[in-house]
Image: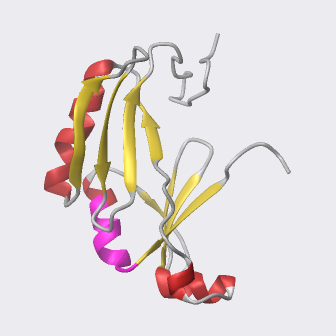
Amino acid sequence: MDQRVSLITLGVKDVETLSAFYDALGWERVETQDGVVAYDLIGQTLGLYPLDALAKDIGIPVDQLGHGAATLGCNVSQKEHVAQVLDQVPAAGGTVLKPAADVFWGGHHGYFSDPEGHIWEVAFNPFSPLGPKGEFRWNGYT
């Protein structure tokens, strides 16, 4: 298996509400089949898929999908951009969980949840500068 993530699929209760949230953050949808909403990212895609349909596709009951302790991350190129992103979240329908703050390891970050509770970290990492298209690599691009 190649060392990469191509598609992140979030099983969601209300596709329209959640897609409206990401639309309000300025994300642009791509053309998809009925029932799926997708946003192309840098090298990946984020998909929103009805929770019941996801469970059926996998072949398990919805209650077995659970909610793992996971976060999605979005790194930004400048420290002040963390607060700028978090400032958009309440008006879009999400909740800021942790305001922008310096981190013990030298970075700056904050957390928010979308309307269904998927948690995002927005971070500036001065040790991992983003590539020319905004792509992230742990130790940056040199």
- Can you name the residue that lies furthest to the right here? 1
Magenta highlight on residue 4: no
Quarter of the image where one finds residue 98: top left
Quarter of the image where one finds residue 91: bottom left
Q: Is residue 25 above or below residue 80?
A: below
Provide residue 17's location: percent of width, then percent of height: 28, 73
Provide residue 99's location: percent of width, then percent of height: 21, 36
* Color scheme of the displayed model: secondary structure
Provide residue 119's location: percent of width, then percent of height: 38, 53
Which span is picked out in magenta?
A: 13-21
Q: Quick check: 134 left or right of 24?
A: right
- Can you name the residue that lies furthest to the top here? 142
Q: Is residue 84 above or below residue 90?
A: above
Q: Quick check: 123 left or right of 4?
A: left
The answer to which of 88 and 105 lies nearer the viewer is 105
- Can you name the residue that lies furthest to the left here? 91
Identify the residue at horizontal 54%, vertical 72% (top origin).
Answer: 32
Residue 34 visible to an observer of this rendering = no
Residue 28 visible to an observer of this rendering = yes
Provide residue 121's location: percent of width, then percent of height: 39, 41
Identify the residue at horizontal 30%, vertical 55% (top origin).
Answer: 113
Q: How many marks?
A: 0
**Which quadrant, please, contains the C terminus?**
top right
Query: What secondary structure is the magenta-colored segment mainly?
Result: helix
Identify the residue at horizontal 78%, vertical 42% (top origin).
Answer: 3
Identify the residue at horizontal 55%, vertical 76% (top origin).
Answer: 65
